[in-house]
Amino acid sequence: MDGTSHNLPDTLQRTRQARRVSQLELSLRLGVSQRHVSFVENGRARPSRDLLTRWLGELDAPLALRNAALLQAGFAPAFRASTLEDPDLAQARAALRQLLNAHDPMPALVLDAQWNLLQLNRGGEWLAATLMAPEALAGSGGPPNLLDMLVHPMGLTRKLINLREAGPAFLAQMRAEAVQQPALAPKVSAFDALLRQRLNGHLPATAHPAPEAPVLTLRFATEHGELAFFRMFTTFGTPQDITLASLKVEHMFAADAATAAVVRAQVR
């Protein structure tokens, strides 16, 4: 949710509900009455800047949404949105590059809140070229988008062996993120449609069936044989800039010795 298409009461109510926090729990956290929380959410009361800032902090709202809510309330925004090339973010860029390089030859990539692919290490470049046709990697006037790659006919799901297991789990993750980032909604719908088509119109009853392993493994059929990976994410701690708050580094680790051997041999 970016908050720009809603008024303040709507933004606050949607944010609280997305976090599954009751009005009573929020009122206890803020030290105000539940009645006051209700009045603010229905537009009968106007919060002070201090209360609104604490309110959004208690709900761990994204920084962009916090700025939008402050503007809706008539206050100046609290956080800036730099470009990644801004000189002030030089240390952050160096940290990202260090993470990517340190993870080679295993794949790693930098994503923003919209799942735009901003950077890849050598392992990531090799894996992308191995799993997808060049046309699936091309962005439409901007950086390539990982969610678009999922639904492209020649994209990531084409060689995904365990789509029935991994697809619904990833769809659930996307739906959760779309609550805070409504711009993702069309991509979520496109992936939902793809899954239903590929799984004969039927999604598993739960996106998280009883797991057979501690982490979900992605298994791909490639010219090098089956490759298996699991994923971890790194984010900036307590970011004070909207751009940094939106970034995450996805690290892919070999899930078996055979995959590790192929990656080490191919990424030179």
Image (tube, rainbow, N blue to C red):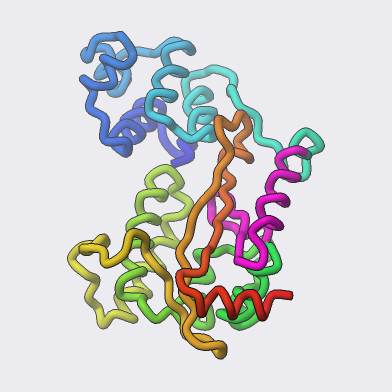
Residue 158 can be seen in this image: no
Occupied quadrant, residue 44: top left
Residue 8 can be seen in this image: yes
Whether the magenta-drawn stretch holds residue 132 is answered as no
Residue ID at (61%, 27%): 79
| Residue 204 falls left or right of residue 146 | left
Occupied quadrant, residue 105: bottom right
| Residue 222 falls left or right of residue 1 | right
Total tally of numbered discs in the picture: 0
Question: Residue 47: horizontal and vertical position, in percent?
Answer: 40, 13
Residue ID at (39%, 20%): 55
Question: Residue 260: horizontal and vertical position, in percent?
Answer: 56, 73
Residue 82 or 73: which is nearer the viewer? Answer: 82
Which quadrant: the C terminus?
A: bottom right
Residue ranking furthest to the left: 205
| Residue 99 falls left or right of residue 73 | right
Residue 126 or 23: which is nearer the viewer? Answer: 126
Q: Which residues are magenta?
A: 91-120
Question: Residue 118: horizontal and vertical position, in percent?
Answer: 66, 57
Residue ID at (54%, 64%): 146
Residue ID at (71%, 50%): 98
Whether the magenta-drawn stretch holds residue 114 is answered as yes
Compared to residue 175, the image places residue 160 above or below, namely below
Which quadrant: the N terminus?
A: top left
Residue ranking furthest to the front: 257
Residue 7 or 143: which is nearer the viewer? Answer: 143
Residue ranking furthest to the bottom: 223
Question: Residue 116: horizontal and vertical position, in percent?
Answer: 59, 57
Occupied quadrant, residue 23: top left
